[in-house]
Image (cartoon, rainbow, N blue to C red):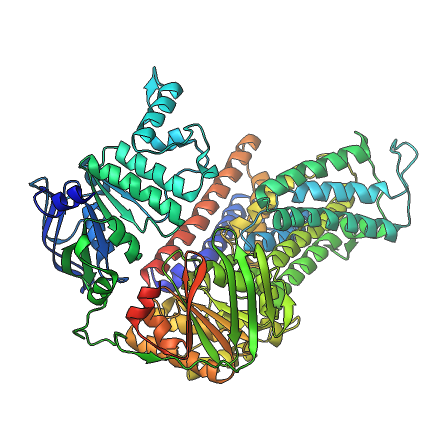
Amino acid sequence: MPAFLRSQMRNIAPFVTLIALLVFFGVASPSFATFDNAANILTQISVAGVIAVGLTFVILCAEIDLSVASVANATGILVAYFTLQENYVNIANVPLPGVLAIVLALVACAFLGLVNAVGMTAIGIPSFIMTLAMMQIGAGMSALLVRGQIAYAVPAAVATLGAGRIGPIPWIVVVLAMFLLAGHVVLTYTRFGRYVYMVGGNREAAEYSGVNVKLVLGAVMVISALCSGVAGMLGVAHFGSAQQNEFDGYLLDAIAAVVVGGTSLFGGRGGIGNTIIGLLILGVLNNGLDHVEIDSFLKILIRGLILLAALIINVYVQAVRESERDGSP
Amino acid sequence: MPEASTAASGEAPARLAMTGITKSFGGVAALRDVDFVLRAGEIHGLVGENGAGKSTLMKIIAGVHTQYDGRMALDGREVHFRSTRDALAAGIGMVHQELSVVPDLTVAENVYLGQQPTRGGVVDWRAMFEGAREHLASLGIDVDPKARMGALAIGLQQLIELARVLFSGARIVILDEPTSALSPPEVQRLFEVLRGVRASGRSIVFISHFLDDVLAVSDTVTVFRNGRCIVSEAAAGVDKAWVIERMIGRGHEELEESYTGNIKLDSKASAPVVLALRELSAGRAFEGVSLDIRAGEVLGVYGFMGCGQIELARTLFGKLRPRGGTMSIEGRLVRLRSTAAARRAGIAFVPESRRSMLFYREPVYKNVSIAVLGHIARLWLRPSVERDIARRHAETLSIRPPTVDTLLQSLSGGNQQKVALAKWLTWPPKVLVLSEPTRGMDVGAKDDVVGIVRGLRDRGLAVVVMSTEPETVLSLADRIVVMKKGRIVREFADESISKDRLLEAA
């Protein structure tokens, strides 16, 4: 394999996968390649997409955040909890002005991210375990707030962004685009973004260069929780309800989007561009499988196989890189 | 035990005989035509500078290096080990400087590691504890076999590892720097155990930089220099100065500068103190370190591997927290909570391993700018400024290739080291701490680094050079302190010094 292709494998493989999927579904189903369906796909990936933006920061640092879906759920429920509900909703909630409800929900999810950050950096709990605990804490908060009930109303701003449209384009897609753009700008053009890549690339070297590694790690956990919180609020508006376990599937979707897109699980390689491709692969796959005649149970298996293939490429590319480095003088 | 030592140097049969051993790595000869004889029931001291060939020879004996020229005979039968497993099966065991004990297991489990006694497929704990107790007692080691390994002192852990090696059937035990982490009483206890092992007819190779220890316990001393076995003598008839002379070599056979002559140290006792350490200590690593590091002066810290200098360097850069004592910079007391705090306080550090300093998959300019990004960019990066800075350094330090977008991994080792230095040159720190700045470099690159460090010193920086190689310290330092087992034992300032006096002090 030529050196250039090999060095770009991380970016090429996901791109080729996406094109192949688009061609396949386009040929297999006449209803797939339409403008309406494209808008559908984008809407379907929006909630997972906003979560994936934050998760990209975390994975670039060679850490993981398993609490994203649960924090999203808790934040979504919290914003509903602070909103006046209809009479038939049997939740002892605390109605507040919309802006205040949103601010409180954001503060709450940032706080959960901060707890993750402190657990990891000050106490030294591995992110895998720390965020596993936070996953449970988030689920517990959700359960306590709604107590098995379902809330429906959210602040007007959240309702618009989550379920409204400007012209033909859903607002939620616009929000996703803005988050992706902001994530890309921060990672590529700011000092903090550079630190994220360097900490992920060689944590020890970053530390010996006087980079405050713990601060960077703490910051990415808070960013991840904030993105999850925003996704949670949008999702509640998008689905039209706030209830327990509503976001459970999004943990896997968000991680899969980042990793399938080619961001290295070992940190330091990849970025928002990769995450966009990963999101599209996932979106096209989920949507496309509904357009072709296929056993709906087989769908789950196919998704698993695609994820496995992406992981193999992800780890294989890293192994090639390592051996190249060891071989060099 | 005078009887044993005469027996060993004379009539005892050769347990291991190596003749004409030659080994090279990529065209560089590590061993040249070496003859080595280890007798039954002797303690054989092996000394020589770093890179003299001691470890290479031992690795051949232990089956690590399988490609070599020459012959090796064990108890008169010719052998050629194809793997470490071969060597183990033939009764050759090794205790490394870095112990390979399992701290979370009990003493007994460590002794029986990999060969637990079983009954019906289940570990027979009672037999294991009893067996371990008996075996340790037979070596004169008194310890509870149920104790957790990690809770014991290092000296005891080492004895237990030695016991394990013997227990696995070793007739030849190679000890690599066994005394470097031990206190004097622990050293004495180790020696007693070793003498007991010798009395049982087994042979011991004792590799060490601590010549006093080698001479105290060995029957025979063999000196290596530049891949050659220079001399083998009965230890009773020689002293430390004699050994040092043969380790360094008076003949100037080698072209390379060997620092055997005197070097005049030009210490600047009147220069202002930039960094002052008072009674600094960090756990087991070092204690009671008091130093004044002055502007415009290179302070060399010399000591053997494991003497505490690596930990001292990390403490200066805020990576390790001191257990006690104080640090002050320009008279102001500082407590470094992180490496970022150390950088802000004006301290820079280049660790001994380039891998822990550099980003191999990133371009050169990002490697250079990482330490000074805070000066260049508040929020937004300015890549053109980063590239300009990197280009300037590439030019002044003659980094090859000079293109700053090259990935770091494609540079040679010497050029990588220059990049590691370049990090700190844009906004020079007050104190620059260098650990092994010239290790593994060719002569040209070494000279470049020496030149860079001298240039920084002349600009008024306080420089600390930590090294286990006397040449590195002698070529750079204006003042030298010697560290030994975590303490500063000697200071050389404003006087003439030579390599043998430095080795003598360590």
Left or right for B62, reference A98: left
Which residue is at the front of the view, B126 or B214? B214
Residue A80, x across and y down, in percent:
83, 42
Image quadrant assignment for residue A237: top right
Q: Is residue B412 visible?
A: no
Image quadrant assignment for residue B415: bottom left
Which residue is at the front of the view, B94 or B247? B247
Residue at image x 66%, y 50%? A117
Left or right for B158, reference B88: right
Left or right for B416, reference B86: right
Location of the N terminus of chain B by quadrant is: top left
Residue B103, x across and y down, in percent:
44, 38
Q: Is residue A265 visible?
A: yes
Question: Which residue is at the far front?
Answer: B2
Residue B244, x across and y down, in percent:
24, 64
Which residue is at the front of the view, A299 or A53? A53
Which residue is at the front of the view, B399 or B252? B252
